[in-house]
Image (cartoon, rainbow, N blue to C red):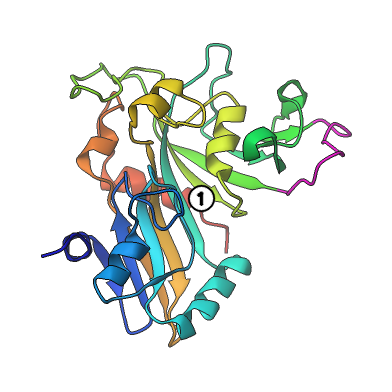
Amino acid sequence: MNLWSELRAGAVLFEDDAALVLNKPPGISVMGERHGTDLVRLAEESGEPVFPVHRIDKNTSGAILFAKELRHHGDLTRQFNRRTVEKVYLAVVTADADAAPLPPAGVIDLPLSVGRKNRVRVAGNRADIGFDAAGRWSLTAGTEFGHVKSYPSQSRFTAVVAAGSDAADTPSGTPAADATHRLLAVAPLTGRRHQIRVHLAWIGHPIVGDPLFDRAAAANGLRTYLHAWRLGFDTADGKRVDVTAAPDADFWQPLPGGAPTPSELDQAHQQLRPAA
C-alpha cells in the first residue's frame, strides 16, 4: 500500500462522486511548490488526481475538501467565494505577557495586508488596535494603513473550555499544559491567508506552535495547534453536508483539562452559528 492509499484509508470524512473530504494530519502540505511531497502530488502519482478547493497550512490539521474531477471544482470553489461554506477551527492559544484576558466570546475585525517578505499582518499598528464593550477588536478610526492594499477580515470565536485545571504530564516535545492555554472555536467570516493565525497573534493570544510567531516552533518543526474542525458545504446534487474532523489525541495535550467533552464542543459550535 502506498502513502496516498494509507492516508486516504484512515482519513476519509465524506466522499461522493464529486467531492472528497479528508482529515489531514499535521506535517504534510495540501499542495505546494517548496515541499518534498504533498497530498495532490501523492494522489496524482497513485493514479487518482484530486483538485483542492481550498487550503490549510502544512502544520495545520483537519478537514480539507477536494473535487474528484475538474468539472466539479468550479461549483465547490464558488461556494467558498460566496461564503456559503461553514468553516470552524479549533485553536489552542496562549497569552502574551501583556495581553488582556480573553472574553468568553468575541469578534476580531482587523483588516489584513502583506508586509515584508510576503508576511501577512494587520493593516495598522498594534498600538492602534482597540477593544470595545461588545467584545470586538478593531483599529481606531483613521489608523488603517493607506499606503498598502488591505483586505477586510473578520474572525468570530468562543472559548470552549476555561483554563485553570492542574497541568498534566505531556510527551517530550509537546508544549506543557498550563493555565495560560485556552481552547477556542473560531469561525473565519472571511477567508484570508493566515487570517486566524494573524488575528489571534495580534490581539496577544497566538496559537501554540505557530511558526509565524514562535521561533522555537519554526526551528524545530513542531505542529501548530490549529485544526480545521467543521466544514459545511452543498454537494453536487444540492444536499447540505456538515463534516466533523476529530483532532488526534496529541492536539489536546497543551490543555490543562485535556480534551473537552462532546457536549462542550457542540455548545461552542452552536454559539458560533448565526442566528436564524
Which quadrant, please, contains the C terminus?
bottom right
Q: Is residue 146 magenta?
A: yes
Residue 220 horizontal/vertical position (percent): 34, 26
- In front: 66, or 96? 66
Hey, which quadrant is residue 2 in on the image?
Answer: bottom left
- Residue 143 visible in image: yes
Residue 209 horizontal/vertical position (percent): 39, 29
> Residue at 71% of width from left, 42% of height from top?
113
Q: Is residue 104 left or right of residue 148?
A: left
> Residue at 33% of width from left, 54% of height from top?
37
- Residue 119 visible in image: no
Q: Which residue is mark 1?
A: 272
Q: Is residue 235 left or right of residue 152?
A: left
> Residue at 16% of width from left, 61% of height from top?
6
Residue found at the very far left of the displayed protein:
1
- Image: 57 above or below 259: below
Q: Is residue 183 magenta?
A: no
Q: Amino acid at mark 1?
A: Leu
> Residue at 30% of width from left, 57% of height from top?
23
- In front: 169, or 40? 40
- Image: 253 above or below 196: above
Q: Check disc 1: other Cα within 10 Å, few if <14, some if 14-19, many if 20+.
A: some
Part of the protein shown in magenta: 140-152
Residue 201 horizontal/vertical position (percent): 56, 29
Tag count: 1
Q: Is residue 197 left or right of residue 4?
A: right
Q: Is residue 113 left or right of residue 192?
A: right
Residue 166 horizontal/vertical position (percent): 25, 16
